[in-house]
Image (spheres, rainbow, N blue to C red):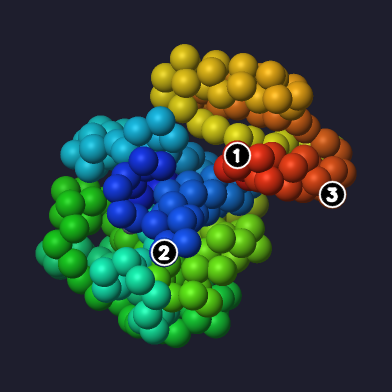
Amino acid sequence: MKIVLDAGHGYSTPGKRTPDGMREYEFNREVAECARQELLRYQDAEVLFTHADDRDVHLKERTDRANTWGAQAFVSIHANAFGNGGWNTAQGIETFCPVATSPDSNRLATIVHRGLIQATARKNRGIKSADFHVLRETNMASILCECGFMTNREEAQLLKSTSYRQTCALAIAEGVVEYFNLTLKTMGVSTRLYKVQVGAFQMKKNADSLAAQLNKSGFPAFVFTEEEFYKVQAGAFSEEVNAKRLAARLRSRGYSTFICY
Ligand SMILES: [Zn+2]
């Protein structure tokens, strides 16, 4: 099954942040990465990202890639906002379907949205339809999840936390698994490595410069390629706690990190 995970926007997209500075893309990309890790544990699951860490990929480029690849599901991941940039009380999770009738999109939305509400216990704002480009121009089951409000103090704290991001990612992945009725791969016992990833770029020079900057700051880092991306990894550990410790040190220096395995 070909599944597109689309993290909305880019790091430098104007607006798109909490009043205290978390960028929406930080949330979106980590949820996409965690959901991908989960989905790849299943037979016949292929995942394509239509976003990139070095630019806000144009919406048309995102939907063209999904269509050309022959994706069977498209999940766009977002965090919501309300008002003019200050804190307010709007809250909860909502999932969008295309305006045009699409039973597949509706079924995918129903399953994923129910999972998100159950897993997070946030306010249920329901399933809605909207004329968003990524829903209108994709020719497969397509949904857009708004996983909480950046302009709500409580939800902004959640959106910043790794645990909430993982919760949303698992709910989305499990929804896709149910939608396609996927089965887990049968794997032998393997040693799991927890890798601390700091960036994923389309341009090699951006990955190289981040790795060089990290090395200069005393964090041994290297660049590797995976699925059209140049990724920067700062360490791999067999104990998750050690990966978390390094990730925390990197975050305290202003780097955006996540742990994958
Ligand atoms: Zn968004």
Q: Nearer the viewer, residue 145 or 142?
A: 145
Labels 2 and 1: the sequence-earlier one: 2
Residue marked by disc 2: 19
- Disc 2 + disc 3, Cβ < 8 Å: no
Q: Is residue 166 above or below residue 4?
A: below
Residue type at mark 2 is Pro
Q: Nearer the viewer, residue 187 or 12?
A: 12
| Disc number placed over residue 255 in the picture, else none | 1
Q: Nearer the viewer, residue 71 or 77?
A: 77
Could you tell me how far apart the alpha carbons at marks 3 and 1 are, in whole angstroms? 18 Å
Residue 89 appears in the picture as rendered: yes
Residue type at mark 3 is Val
Q: Is residue 78 above or below residue 202?
A: below
Q: Is residue 233 above or below residue 46?
A: above
For residue 150, side relative to residue 42 (left or right) = left
Labels 3 and 1: the sequence-earlier one: 3
* Residue drawn at the location 68% of the way across and 46% of the way down: 252
* Residue drawn at the location 80% of the way across and 46% of the way down: 245
